[in-house]
Amino acid sequence: MTGSRDLTDIADRVVGWAADGEAVEAVVGRSRHTEVRAYEGDVESLSSAESMGVGIRVVLGDRQGFAYAATFDDDVLAETLAEARDNASFASPDPHVGLAEPDGVAVPTLDLFRPSLLQVPTEDKVAMALELEALVRAGDPRISGVESAEFVDAMGEACVASTTGIRSESASTACYVAVSCLAEEDGLTQTGFGFSVGRELGDLVPADASDDAVMRSTRLLGATKPASTRATVVLDPYVTAQVIAILGSTLSGEAVLKGRSPFAERLGDEVGSPLVTLVDDATNPLAYTASATDGEGLASRRTSLLADGVLQAFVHNAYTGRWAGTASTGNAVRGGFKSTPGVGCRALALAPGQLDQPALLRQVGDGVLVSSVIGMHSGVNPVSGDFSTGAEGLRIAGGELGAPLREFTIASTLQKMLRDVEAVGSDVDWLPMSAAGVSLVIRDVTISGT
């Protein structure tokens, strides 16, 4: 842990002010964030911010109130607690409101905090962003511009305590470099991107991010629209990560309870290929979003959502768990001390297969590699599962990557795509998001082009 004793002391103090008959939760947080963006060899923007404060939730019977303050001053916190009480008195009754209660799951010890990241001088962060941009520009003579080259880091620590017996701490650091570039040839332009993710500066490899961005942009030069057809597609890990993140949203207890999931009422059903095993596991230190605890202070844990294609569970926080007549799965998500907890998947990943992407391409023979998608969130209906999104990629011919393709759409439904998974790659890639990527082979996908 990081020496967040002061946060715990504050949380304990606020909880100690609870009156008889009320439940009080205090979330005390502190964070730092830096973002540097390079452009044409200079710093286009540099921002850094620090935040600290306390969010207080009060439950009075079947009513809940919340208020927060961006300070640790005791007088202000006492006023904030009074404001939360007042808000509770005006809230609509809800039989499911209540704070999380200890469930016996031990908080894991995770090595997610690197003090070294806090000591990095700003000039080193600037230098890394500039280095990234320079690497991309030098990566190929067809690179005509760099849309963005950035370094981002973040540190966060928090304590949650409550009158119900919750008392937990978490802390982590994270950083990444990301670049998006343009490649041009014969008057045609394509874009590409690359990332490198870590918990301290030494984890980052700008050359890897640069190589990916250059490769992704230049290999699409000369792309043409494909003819409309149905084909086997191989999703690039970055695309797969976006798909399973949307799938995860359909497996939240809130979506299910509100009738907004195509998988409601299907627990125990075989909803996917036997090759599909999907877990949510924020205890995995490789995940960018790993954390020892969830937004209500319960221990993070591994939740199997699909096992061999069979729907195993939905994710819950204390509220949706109570509403569903079950228990929290440690999936309370929270945007810091300024918000009340929601529910959602926190670190999704498919169980990897045995083959890397080149081997999968040979196995597929003929099809399409989807390297990126456009407007994924607007193209997928998480209620019905209908899926239609713009894409670009490369033709797969004879087991090898072939001609580049652009301006086509891929369409199916989440349900059908799960059933039509033909192979899962071994190339797990943890990205700066709440889901890991892996190459994914899906048969019989509608491709609309010319």
Image (cartoon, rainbow, N blue to C red):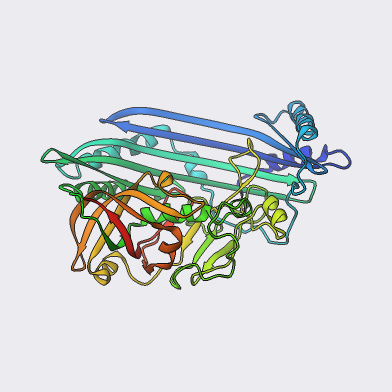
Residue 205 visible in this rendered orientation of the protein: no
Identify the residue at horizontal 30%, vertical 41% (top origin): 180
Q: Is residue 224 above or below residue 357?
A: above
Side (left or right) of 249 relative to 338: left
Q: Report which quarter residue 108 is drawn in.
A: bottom right
Side (left or right) of 51 relative to 133: right
Q: Nearer the viewer, residue 39 or 250?
A: 250
What is the x, y in percent for residue 368? 26, 60
What is the x, y in percent for residue 439? 35, 62
All told, the count of numbered labels is 0
Q: Is residue 355 above or below residue 38?
A: below
Side (left or right) of 156 relative to 245: right
Q: Residue furthest right?
A: 20
Q: Is residue 167 above or below residue 444?
A: above
Residue 267 visible in this rendered orientation of the protein: yes
Q: Report which quarter residue 7 is drawn in.
A: top right
Q: Report which quarter residue 82 is drawn in.
A: top right
Identify the residue at horizontal 44%, vertical 64% (top origin): 418
Q: Nearer the viewer, residue 42 or 395?
A: 395
Identify the residue at horizontal 21%, vertical 59% (top origin): 395
What is the x, y in percent for residue 325? 72, 59
Identify the residue at horizontal 75%, vertical 44% (top origin): 94
Q: Nearer the viewer, residue 291 or 414?
A: 414
What is the x, y in percent for residue 288? 48, 51
